[in-house]
């Protein structure tokens, strides 16, 4: 299958084995492989240095295999395609000819984690129910054009700001009223009046989407929150027919959308889990809550009394406006293809893409993960990474909120895995009460290296403003001190630190000072400008129910979340960072000022990796 000359190698692919086999082989050739000692049933293998060039050749029907392997190596950041040659060699019978492709892959010199203890931290990012909520970087130029048109439509609708009566219409209202009446909902006469004298004559953009009053009353965002995406007992989600979720139904027009919406809200029964490990059958219309004036004072007493049917009407109007807008802006329906590509990258194939990226860092002795779902951790447990690493999740992992911190410990560096979980010890050591932590935010374990050095390994996800980070840092330091001076700390975190701190935001400057006071340091070089250590770059679009949070495309970097949030912390006396780099491309490269996630990188946090040299 493979022949080598110096640091170059040719790999001939065929149809005798699957594409995955040749992808794995090409990865080994380009990455190199460590030596393997012989064990029972397994032969020893010498260390294999990486090749500088890999020639992938395929004959006839195997051409598609060669192309797939080359594209995968380029996508994984292992190599670039340096040349493609098409031949028609003469076959042994001397008469027939078959096409052949020869693709030259040149190995990319990626940042190395050699020279010390390799550590990675990465907030995987919980799945976002709205694929359009954040600006992303898309390979299809039509995405940027579409989102610019959406922004213009909402900011300056002009004559396109049509009345709701023209978009949703009286006939649809009558149908909706009949459905609500069948539910026994009270106050429909009052809702009739609100429809006729107010909502039906409002303009779509200025009167609904941009109306601050509706936003303050939560009449669109509240029902969207409860019906946008429903997690079923089977583990699969159910989606309301809408532009702003992962629903794959065709929504080319309001006429096509409306029957689907009615059926979903009032006819379809969903099997949803209950708190007692059981389940119940409900229809989405039964999930709509009352909106209480005590919590949302903008809503009037009269509106509170009819808040269930009123929010159902407002949600229908809101969804209809979005379908109408997308039809106006993309009459050929290309917007749905763009949506599908985003859904694939950030939802349907997110776990597979995330696992592939982590697999590219399998040389790390410690990988600290944040915002990992229970389902994803289960997938990791049966992945190839489980053969090289212990997968350690918190004992109190939360499957409801489903944003869990976890650690992966190299089986070679930490043969015994985690000896004991100390998460509860850290929570007990917090100097603020009540605890600012949600279930799954933190995991702390005690472990021992192959050389006998004790370690405390932790992974943590801070609150949005970063205010829980400092108390957790102090509590971990207390538990570390109790473990003794010889115990080393590896602490990967999304600290939610901000470049510019304030009374409400935890600043990265304060974070570094807190680390220093505790005898700790981060993986970033001392004195480095933290503006060069940014690990997030995202901003909200105009395609969402809370437009007050939308960021104009021209101000994404100025008003978006562009901050140095992710860090690896350890004892200053224990280690010195040899090298540190970040990644938002899945290629061990970080593109500054690029909004992400992207189709290749499914998280809104960059991955941070470091090699630590022991001082002991």
Image (cartoon, rainbow, N blue to C red):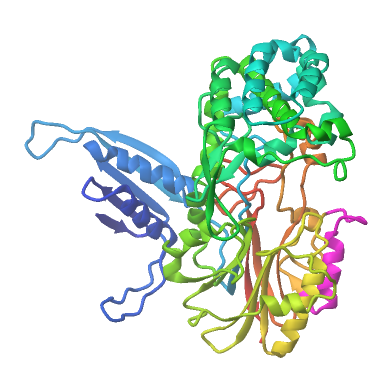
Query: Residue 305 at what x, y percent from top left?
Result: 81, 34
Looking at the image, which residue sits at the far right? Answer: 503
* In the depicted structure, whether residue 399 falls above or below residue 253: below
Q: Which residues are magenta?
A: 499-520
Image quadrant where one finds the N terminus: bottom left
Position of 523 with respect to 39 (left or right) is: right
Image quadrant where one finds the C terminus: bottom right
Residue 318: which quarter of the image? top right
* In the depicted structure, whether residue 76 falls above or below residue 336: below
In the depicted view, which residue is nearer to us: 388 or 529? 388
377 magenta-colored: no
Residue 552: which quarter of the image? top right
* Residue under the point 38% across and 58% down: 29
Tally of numbered tags: 0
In the depicted view, which residue is nearer to us: 168 or 150? 168
Query: Residue 456 at what x, y percent from top left?
Result: 65, 80
Q: Is residue 109 visible?
A: no
* Residue under the point 77% across and 35% down: 546
513 magenta-colored: yes
In the depicted view, which residue is nearer to us: 434 or 564? 434
* In the depicted structure, whether residue 425 falls above or below residue 337: below
Position of 338 with respect to 539 (left or right) is: left
Residue 330: which quarter of the image? top right
Query: Residue 147 at what x, y percent from top left?
Result: 67, 27
């Amino acid at each position: 299958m493979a022949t080598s000359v110096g640091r170059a190698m040719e790999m001939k692919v065929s149809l005798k084995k699957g594409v995955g086999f040749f992808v794995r082989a090409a990865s080994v050739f380009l990455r190199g492989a460590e030596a393997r000692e012989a064990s029972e049933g397994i032969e020893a293998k010498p260390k294999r240095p990486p090749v500088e060039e890999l020639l992938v050749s395929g004959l006839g029907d195997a051409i598609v295999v060669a192309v797939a392997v080359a594209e995968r190596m380029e996508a994984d950041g292992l190599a670039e395609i340096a040349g493609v040659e098409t031949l028609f060699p003469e076959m042994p019978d001397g008469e027939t000819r078959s096409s052949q492709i020869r693709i030259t892959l040149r190995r990319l010199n990626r940042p190395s984690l050699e020279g010390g203890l390799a550590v990675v931290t990465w907030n995987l990012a919980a799945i976002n129910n709205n694929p359009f909520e954040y600006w992303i970087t898309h390979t299809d130029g039509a995405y940027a054009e579409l989102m610019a048109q959406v922004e213009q439509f909402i900011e300056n609708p002009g004559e396109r700001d049509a009345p709701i009566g023209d978009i949703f219409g009286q006939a649809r209202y009558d149908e909706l009223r009949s459905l609500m009446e069948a539910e026994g909902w009270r106050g429909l006469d009052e809702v009739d009046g609100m429809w006729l004298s107010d909502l039906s004559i409002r303009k779509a953009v200025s009167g609904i989407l941009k109306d601050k009053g509706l936003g303050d009353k939560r009449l669109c965002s509240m029902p969207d929150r409860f019906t946008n995406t429903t997690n079923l007992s089977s583990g699969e989600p159910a989606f309301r027919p809408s532009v702003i979720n992962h629903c794959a139904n065709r929504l080319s027009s309001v006429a096509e959308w409306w029957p689907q919406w009615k059926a979903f809200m009032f006819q379809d029964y969903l099997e949803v889990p209950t708190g007692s490990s059981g389940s119940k059958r409900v229809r989405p219309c039964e999930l709509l809550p009352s909106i209480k004036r005590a919590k949302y004072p903008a809503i009037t007493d009269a509106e509170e009394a009819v808040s269930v049917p009123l929010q159902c009407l407002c949600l229908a109007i809101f969804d209809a406006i979005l379908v109408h807008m997308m039809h106006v802006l993309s009459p050929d329906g290309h917007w749905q293809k763009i949506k599908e590509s985003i859904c694939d990258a950030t939802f349907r194939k997110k776990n597979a893409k995330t696992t592939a990226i982590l697999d590219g860092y399998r040389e790390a002795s410690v990988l600290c993960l944040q915002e990992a779902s229970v389902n994803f951790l289960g997938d990791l447990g049966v992945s190839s990474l489980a053969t090289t690493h212990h997968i350690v999740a918190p004992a109190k992992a939360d499957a409801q909120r489903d944003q869990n911190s976890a650690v992966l410990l190299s089986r070679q560096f930490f043969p015994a895995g985690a000896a004991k979980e100390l998460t509860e010890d850290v929570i007990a050591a917090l100097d603020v009460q009540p605890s600012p932590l949600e279930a799954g935010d933190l995991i702390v374990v005690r472990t021992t290296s192959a050389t006998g050095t004790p370690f405390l390994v932790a992974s943590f996800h801070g609150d949005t403003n970063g205010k829980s980070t400092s108390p957790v840092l102090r509590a971990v330091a207390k538990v570390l001190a109790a473990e003794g001076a010889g115990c080393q700390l590896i602490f990967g975190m999304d600290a939610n630190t901000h470049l510019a701190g304030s009374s409400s935001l935890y600043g990265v400057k304060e974070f570094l000072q807190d680390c220093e006071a505790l005898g700790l340091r981060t993986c970033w070089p001392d004195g480095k400008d933290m503006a060069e250590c940014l690990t997030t770059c995202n901003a909200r679009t105009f395609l969402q129910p809370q437009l007050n949070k939308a960021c104009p495309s021209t101000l994404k970097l100025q008003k978006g979340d562009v901050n140095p949030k992710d860090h690896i912390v350890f004892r200053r006396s224990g280690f010195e960072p040899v090298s540190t780099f970040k990644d938002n491309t899945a290629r061990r490269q970080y593109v500054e000022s690029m909004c992400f996630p992207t189709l290749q990188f499914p998280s809104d946090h960059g991955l941070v990796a470091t090699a630590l040299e022991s001082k002991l």
